[in-house]
Image (cartoon, grey):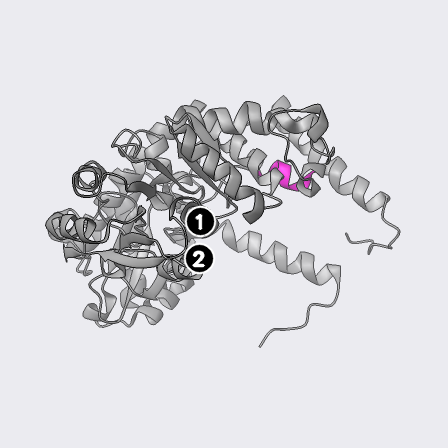
Amino acid sequence: MAQPVETLDDVLRILGEHEDHAHRTLNMVPSENAMSGLAKLPLLLDCYHRYFFNEGDQAERWHFRGAQRLRDLEMGLTVPLLEELGRARYVSVRPLSGLNAMTLALATLGGEPGSTVVTISPDNGGHYATPSVARRLGLRIEFLRGLDPHTLDFDHAADLLRRVRPALVYVDQSHCLFPVDVARLVATVRAASPETLVHVDASHWFGLVLAGVFPNPLDEGADSFGGSTHKTFPGPQKAALLTRDPDIERRIRDTQGYLISSHHFAATISLGMALLEFRDFGGADYAKAVVANTREFGSLLTQRGTTVVAADRGCSAGHQLWLDTEADGVPPREASDRLAQAGIRVNFMAGLPGFAGQGVRIGLNEPTYQGVTLNDLPELADIFTAALRGTTPAARLADRTAQLRRRPRFGATVGAGSPLLRGALELATNALLSEQVNSPNTVPESV
C-alpha cells in the first residue's frame, strides 16, 4: 500500500533517497539506460514547456512562438546527427517512445484497414504489443515463425508472403539474443511479395546500429527503421524513425500530424546532446564494449554454474542475456529480489522465447555506460552468483556493487572546474530559482 506523501519535503526526501541508492546500484535491465547530466539539462529549462511544429522555419507557421529561438537545436543538431549516424536522408523525431514509434509506423505503412501486416511471432521475440496495436488500427496480423526461439524459418516466410501479400513486414524483436538477418529477410520479401514494405524496429539495437557495430537496416535493404533511444543508446526516453525514401518520409509526416501533438521538445534537444556526445566521445567504443561485455559475462556466469540460455551459441550477439534461474533452483522473482538486495536490478518476466514460465532477463548496456569493463566482470559475476545462491550477506555484496558503480562512465569528461559544467549548473540553478521566485506560492524554507 502506498504511503501518503503530503509535503514537498516528503517529495525531496524520497527523490534524494532514490538518488543515493541509484548511485550505489548497477542497473541491468536491458530496456533501460542512463544518460549524461549535461543531456538532462533541457528537461529543467523553459523548452520543456514548449511546442515546436515549424521544422521549415516558415514565417506564417510560427503559431507557437515559444521554441522559435531554439529551432536549430532540433533541425540543426538532433535531426542532422540522426541522419549522419543512422545513414538516413530523412528523420522523424516526433515519436515519444518505442511503442509510440510502432503505432506511427503501423498507421503510416500498414495500409488501409483490412490490410495485412506480417510481424515476428512472440515465440521468436516479437513485441507483445504489436498485434494489439495493429488490430486496433484495423489491420490483420500474420506471424513469421522460427525453427527455434532465435532463428526465423525463411522458407515459411516466403510461403506466407506469397500467400497473404502484406502491405508491411514489421520486424519487431523485443526479446532478442540474436538479431534477425535483415538482408536475407528483405531479399525474401522482395522475391515473394515485391510491393511489401519492410520496417525494422531496432529499439534494442539502436545504439549498436548508430555506432556501426550492428548492420544498418537501411544498408540491408529495409525501407525504414527506428525505435526507442534509451536501451543500447544512452539517451532520453524517446524514439525516432529513419528512412531514405522521400515517399515514406512524406507519409510519416502526414500521419504524425494527427497522431502526435507535443513531441516533448526538451527531450528532443536532450537526444541531440546525447547524440553529440555519442559521436564525439566514444560512442563506437561504448557499443563495442557492450557486445564484448555481454558475451564475456554470459560465459562467466555459465562457468559459475548459472544456466544461461544459448550458451552453446555464445549466449548473445548484443546486450541481452537470459537466465533460467528456475532450472538452478531459484524462482525468477526470488532471484530478482536477491539481486536487488545486492544492488543489482534485473528483469524477471514471462514471455521469454523458449521459457515455459518466467525467466530473468539482464543487459550489460547500462553497466557498460557506467564504466564497467571486461576487467570488472569477474567481480560482478562473483557478486551476481553469490546473490543468486544466497551464500554471502546481501549488505556485503551491495558494498562490492557500489564499488563497481564508481567507475568513470563513457562519454564527455567534464571536470569540476570546467566552463561547460559551470554554465550548465548556472542554467539549472537559475531555472529552479526563477520558477520559485515568480511563484505566488510559499515554498518551505528547506527547499
**Which residue has dot 1 on it?**
107
Location of residue 131 in the rendering, given as x and y in whole percent from the top left corner? 35, 60
Q: Residues within 10 Å of mark 1 (few under 14, many from 20)?
A: many
Front in this rendered view, residue 26 or 241: 241
The residue pinned by badge 2 equals 137
The x and y percentages for residue 440 are 89, 51
> Which residue is most to the bottom?
1
Kind of residue sitting beneath label 1: Ala
Residue at (30, 62) in percent of width and height? 360
Along the line of sight, which residue is nearer the eye, 293 or 180?
180
Q: Nearer the viewer, residue 201 or 447?
A: 201
Q: Nearer the viewer, residue 27 or 67?
A: 67
The relative height of residue 357 versus residue 178 in the rendered view (above or below) is below
> Can you give x and y, in whole percent of width and height, for residue 214 in the image?
27, 34
The magenta region covers 40-45
Q: Is residue 324 above or below residue 373?
A: below
Q: Is residue 415 visible?
A: no
Farthest right residue?
Answer: 440
Q: Secondary structure at mark 2?
A: loop
